[in-house]
Structure formats: C-alpha cells, structure tokens
Image: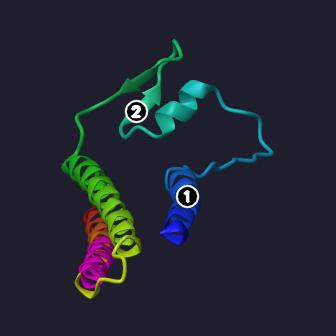
Amino acid sequence: MRFKLFVLSLVGPLVLLFGTAAPVLAATSTTTPTPASSQVCAGVPNAHVASDGTCQVTGSPTLNNVVATAVNVLSMIVGLAGVIMVVMGGFKYITSGGDGQKAAGAKNTLVYAVIGLVIAALAQVLVQFVIKKST
C-alpha cells in the first residue's frame, strides 16, 4: 500500500506538469518585426489589415474552413478524452491490488484508449489531406 501511494505521489504531479503543459515556440526573425495586427490577421482566413490597423475579414468562410475548424475542435475533444482514459486506466491498474480481473479491466481500458487516440490521429490526417486536395 505504501508503494502504491509513493508511486501515485510521484506520477500525479508529473502527469499534471507534463500532461497539461503547452509547448512554447519561440520565433526568431532577422527581418524587421511586423505589427501585432498583421500577426493576428495572418492566422485568420480571408483577413487583411485595414488602413486604421484593425483586422478586417473579407468574404464569407468557405466550406473547407468550416469543416477544418469543426474537425480540429472534435479532434481536440477526442484527444482530451483519450488522454483522460489513459490516465484513468493507469490509475485503475496501479490500484488493482493484484486482483487479476481488475488488472485485466485496466489493461483493456489502456489498450482501447490508445487505439482510440490512434484512430483520432489518423482521422485528423485523412481529413486534412482531403481538405488540402480539394483546394
């Protein structure tokens, strides 16, 4: 019992630290810096910087943009659910206490969660491929 608590006390903070940390990407450039409004508009489809410095969106969003946004949101939800299931399966496995049925159930949870994450990643790749080919 002490060993399980020790492992949980080590794994818990690591999961919280590395599982929720977002990567920080630093951009280096040798050119002159661009205004913040240009950088914001660069990430918005069908947008440009107006003469007053504001970001103006022109036209209506295309079907590809709507589908890509929907797929990205769904992929994030599925990915988050998969990661939560992996953590829950690991917790169930650690706390199974040597019971074969509980350990088998925890292993099944882990396997199915990983399979779900792989399927979600492949679906994301497939949809992005189709969207790029359709434009």
Q: Is residue 112 magenta?
A: yes
Of helix, strand and loop, which mostly describes the magenta segment? Answer: helix
- Looking at this view, name the residue that lies furthest to the front: 1
Q: Are marks 2 and 1 in contact (CB under 8 Å)?
A: no
At a point 56% along the width and 57% down the height, the residue shown is: 18
Image quarter in which the C terminus is found? bottom left
The image quadrant that residue 134 belongs to is bottom left
Q: Which mark is residue 103?
A: none
Q: Position of residue 55 (x, y in %)?
A: 45, 23
Residue lying farthest right? 30
Q: Position of residue 121 (x, y in %)?
A: 34, 71
Answer with mark 2 or mark 1, whichever residue precedes in sequence. Answer: 1
Q: Nearer the viewer, residue 125 or 14?
A: 14
Q: Is residue 6 above or below residue 108?
A: above
Q: Residue at x 64, y 26 (%)?
A: 35
Label drawn at residue 9: 1
- Horizontal placement of 69 versus 21: left or right? left
> What amino acid does circle 2 point to?
Ala
Q: Residue at x 33, y 75 (%)?
A: 96
Q: Secondary structure at mark 1?
A: helix
Which residue is the site of mark 2? 47
Does the magenta-highlighted stretch encompass residue 76? no
Name which quarter of the figure residue 127 lies in.
Answer: bottom left
The alpha-carbon separation of the residues under discs 2 and 1 comes to: 48 Å
The residues colored magenta run 102-117
Residue 51 position in % (x across, y down): 51, 16
Foreground of the two, 61 or 8? 8
Query: Is residue 98 placed above or below 2 in the rendered structure?
Result: below
Q: Residue at x 45, y 30 (%)?
A: 48
**Which amino acid type corresponds to the residue marked 1 in the rendered image?**
Ser
Is label 2 or label 1 in front?
1
From this viewpoint, which residue is outermost toward the top? 52
